[in-house]
Image (tube, rainbow, N blue to C red):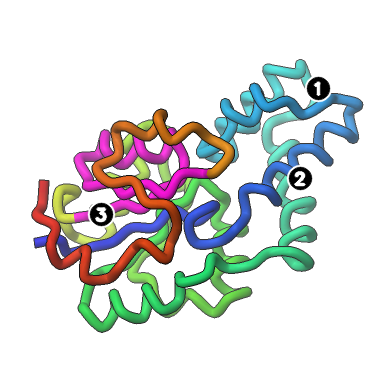
Amino acid sequence: MIKAVIFDMDGVMIDSEPLWEKTERILLARRNIDYSPEYRDLIVGLNQRDSGKLLKETFSLDETVDEIISERVEILTAIYEEELEVVPGLTPLLDELKLREYLLAVASSSPLRVINFVLDMFSLHGYFDAVVSGECTEKGKPHPDIYLHTAERLRVRPSECVAIEDSINGVRSATGAGMYCIAIPDKRLSPEAFERAHLILENMDDLKPQLFDTLEPL
């Protein structure tokens, strides 16, 4: 039987992808660089180090990757304090999954500092048995490492886990780890690109707790 449900954070638990994009636009505007849809499609779902490397290499920036990440996180958390909202339906879903005794985890490409900021902001820490950031593994999404590491932290097999994702890189990571993957696609991305997901839903409201009871391990 399925024992664990693992949530990506950005775009799944919180309506943050537009705020990440706003952050990226500000970061690039400070360097007189325009933010393009093509760049957005490449960066969505990457961890901070990989996206920092991509930004540095794409635009030939002089700063180190660590300096880029630090500035980005400062911009982002300031925006979060003013504008961030939790996705409707998330808290009732978490309540019901805990009642059904599923293990719950976060597996996010965001830095741990940002994940903890969000979990504290919405009082969500108590729901999760494990919190894993993109800093915990050398290779980020789309590599499967973050999901394999999360399953190990939960002490379950990857095949006993369901991952909830909104990005193409995230779906590749979860399915590459051997997990059942439910996609709630980022509305800015083409749904056809999510064909590797086992199930595609429109929004969090479509994700019913009883669904997990019907799933068989892969």
Residue identifier under label 3: 162
Tell me, for residue 155, which label it has, or none.
Answer: none
Q: Is residue 153 left or right of residue 25?
A: left
Which residue is drawn at the image coordinates 76% and 16% (left, top)? Answer: 60
Residue identifier under label 1: 62
Q: Are marks 2 and 1 in contact (CB under 8 Å)?
A: no
Q: Residues within 10 Å of mark 2 (few under 14, many from 20)?
A: some
Which numbered disc flags the more N-terminal residue, 3 or 1?
1
- The total number of labels drawn is 3
Magenta stretch holds residue 97: no
**Position of 100 relative to 111 (above/below):** below
Amino acid carrying mark 2 in the image: Lys
- Assign a secondary structure to mark 1: loop
Give the extent of the magenta segment. Answer: 161-186
Which residue is drawn at the image coordinates 68% and 46% (left, top)? Answer: 20
User: Disc 3 to disc 2, how far (Cα)?
Assistant: 30 Å
Residue identifier under label 2: 22
